Image (cartoon, helix red, strand yellow):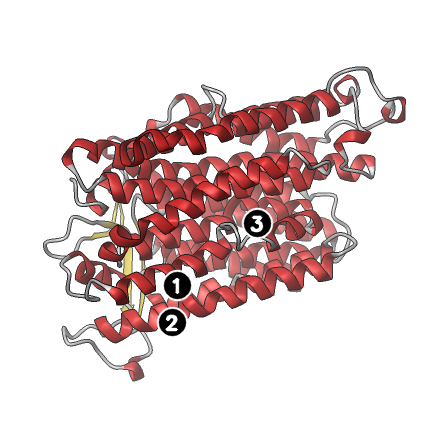
Amino acid sequence: MVLDIPILSIMLLTPAMGAVLVYFTGRNEETARTTALAISFIPLVLSVVLLLGFFPVTGVELRSFSPVGSPFTYRAYESAPWLPMYGVTPSGDAAVSYSLGVDELSAPLVLLTCILTTLALIINWDEHHRVREFYAMFLFMETTILGVFISLDFFLFFLFWELGLVPMYFIIAVWGGPRKRYAALKFFLFTFAASIPVLIGIFAFFAYGGTFNMVRLIELARTGALIPAGTVQNLLFVALLAGFGTKLPTWPLHTWLPDAHVEAPTGGSVILAGVLLKLGGYALIRVNVQMLPQGAHEMYWVAAILGTISILYGAIVCLAQDDLKRLVAFSSVSHMGFVTLGIAAGVVASGTPATATGGLLGMSGAIFQMFAHGIVSAALFMVAGSLGHKAGTRNISEFGGIAAVTPRLSTFLMIAFLASLGLPGLVGFVAELSVFLGVYAAFGLLVLIPLLTVVFTAAYYIWAMQRAIFGPLNARWKDLEDAHSYETVPLAVLCALFAIFGILPFLLLDMTIQWAARALGVA
């Protein structure tokens, strides 16, 4: 079955048009909710179709494009000249183009975005404050995030990168907690300032490559014809690491994250942790690794050190947290550190034939970790938000024995904790094991340093479970409500995904390994 339709344009524009529709027609709260949810299923179905296109056995064929002599293929590819006033490249292509495409790097993240957007709309089904604006913001946010993942032109990429700040700012500032304005402004200022080195990097690529087309720039970099190896590449690598690392977030550029998570509404935290952080990891791989290959090999140690510190720092700080949402926020700093460390390990280990396999596991593990953390953190924030809404507090020390009155919420929280700490059979185990194998291949016994986080992670999650869920019931919570159906459904879906991708990781891991082999030059 050949799908020769502009599937990416439909996926990109549908949520944006849906946001307008919800805003202008959703006068009734129920109408706004159901319209937004119905619209969100369109990109979700298309994202599944996109993923099926990477498996020949499914028979789904997508329009594809592969530059002459290139090992990379971009599926569902669309490209047209745009903004002709910026001229053409020496090869005759438009300097600025409307170019969209997905590969094995972006397809899992596109699927993740569409899944979590739909589930975030459901988990906030009881929102009653400015409902049409609330749901419109989530649909617009989906367009901006998808735009980053599927753009193959830096002009488009940066446009969506910046636009994404707007809906998240309002989601926190309008529907957030008591300190929502402070958290929203801090989020905006940190991430907006981080865009400065990103913009400088983009213009540097344009200056050397004569185009914003990312496919062309990747090919020039692969042949060594983009930016000369040496100081310029090294400085650009560090600058872009700072810009993308702020969004990731990487220590010490993470301080906006806990405040944003604590004050954001539940759906906002789901999108923020589940998808928005992944923009930084995706950009590090797409830009720093693919377009600055020599800089990556020279400056990998910066990413490795920052990733290791993020892993340990986030885990240790979690031990001191009492607010459940804040604990999950700092755990995100720790778990996203695996992405940075896995990228560094992949670059280093791929340099020698003896460790090339480990390098592939490190890089593909970093990609898989983004997907795994996306669904696990979403579930954790859903439970934390639901408990906070029902109990009026998220402090772990104030609970106790709530499994007796909230069996569904307690079960979901326990499963999400176990998935996050890396229990075999669940999705987090596969991601972290792959990164650890890559780190061992690259750095040998230095893997023992980040490996310490396994102990810390188990400690803070099990301690939180013991104090909040188990033990004698605190009489204060004898009438505490359990999960409603609109909370049970998205949590059940996420827990099913933990098991599916934990037991059958090859559904994503095989394709990411194949992509990593081409990106690292060991195919």
- Amino acid found under the numbered disc labelled 3: Leu
Query: On the image, numbered disc 3 is attached to which residue?
Result: 272
Residue identifier under label 2: 200
Q: For the point 65% across and 38% down, which residue is it?
A: 327
Q: Looking at the image, can residue 4 be seen? A: no
**Horizontal placement of 238 versus 112: left or right?**
left
CA gap between label 1 and label 2 equals: 9 Å
Observer-nearest of 38 and 54? 54
Dot 2 crowding, Cα within 10 Å, few <14, some 14–19, many 20+: some
Of callouts 1 and 2, which one flags the residue occurring earlier in the amino acid sequence? 2
Identity, as a three-letter code, of the amino acid under mark 2: Ile
Single out the residue that lies furthest toward the bottom.
85
Q: Is residue 292 visible?
A: yes
Q: CA distance from mark 3 to mark 1?
A: 23 Å
Q: Please identify the quadrant where the N terminus is shown.
A: top left
Residue at 67% across, 52% down: 259
The residue to which callout 1 is attached is: 239
The local secondary structure at tag 3 comes to helix
Near-viewer residue (148 or 197): 197
Please say if 513 is above or below 307: above
Which mark sits nearer the N-terminus, 3 or 1?
1
Q: Which of labels 1 and 2 is toward the front? A: 1
Residue 27 position in % (x across, y down): 73, 59
Q: Residue at x 44, y 25 (%)?
A: 429
At mark 1, the secondary structure is helix
All told, the count of numbered labels is 3
> Which SS class for mark 2?
helix
